[in-house]
Amino acid sequence: MSMKNEMQKQRNRLENCKRKLAAARARGDQPIVTQFVEEIAKIEKRLAQMNHKQSFDLNKERKSLMDMAFSREITKAEQADLGKLKKSVRGLVIVHPMTKLGKELRLEVMTGYAPKAF
């Protein structure tokens, strides 16, 4: 299962537990309340771990792109035929500004990163 799906599943579980906790508190059912409080703490800890892992991976990818020797803006003509561009430049990585990586790099336009000038 992908990280994104797993995180969404955990968020859904957290929301359900919070809703059930509120209902148990309204009933005054103390054993169920403690059970859901523990469950919520466990789920929140797992979500924090997953968020940290995701940011670590994103930061590692960002650093690898910044270490590449060459980067430049991709022109509109090149954007029209990205397949041809990728075939002609070995090791080219294209980053769109609306992706997580693009936002992390604070890009304004589509940018290509490569080990050599293209």
Image (cartoon, rainbow, N blue to C red):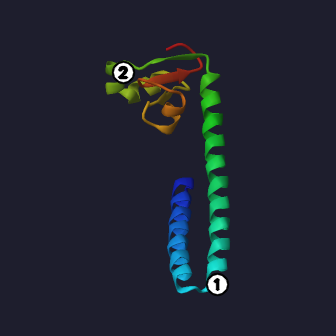
Identify the residue shown where x is 60% and y is 31%.
62
User: In the rendered image of this protein, does residue 98 appear above or below residue 28?
Assistant: above
- Badge 1: how crowded within 10 Å, few (<14), some, or many (20+)? few
Between residue 34 and residue 73, name the one nearer to us.
34
Contact check, label 1 and label 2, Cβ < 8 Å: no
- How many numbered discs sit on the rendered protein? 2
Residue 86 found in image quarter = top left
In percent of width and height, residue 54 lies at: 61, 46
In the rendered image, which residue does mark 1 sit on?
A: 30
Residue at (40% x, 30% y) in the render: 83
Q: Residue at x 49, y 32 (%)?
A: 103
**Percent from the top left, x then y, of residue 21?**
56, 76
N-term mark: 1 or 2? 1
| In this picture, residue 46 sits left or right of residue 5 | right
Q: Position of residue 49 (x, y in %)?
A: 67, 54
Dot 2 amino acid type: Glu
User: Residue at the top extreme?
Assistant: 117
- Name the front one of labels 1 and 2: 1
110 relative to 59, above or below:
above
Q: Nearer the viewer, residue 18 or 14?
A: 18
Identify which residue is drawn at 52% across, 54% down: 4
Seen from the viewer's position, the closer of residues 58 and 106 is 106
Amino acid at dot 1: Gln
Residue 105 on image: x %, y %? 54, 28
Assign the N terminus to one quadrant of the image: bottom right
> Helix, strand or loop at disc 2?
helix
Q: Secondary structure at mark 1?
A: helix
Q: CA distance from mark 1 to mark 2?
A: 64 Å
103, above or below 1, in the image: above
| Residue 5 left/right relative to 55 | left
Quadrant position of residue 55? top right
What residue is disc 2 on?
A: 78
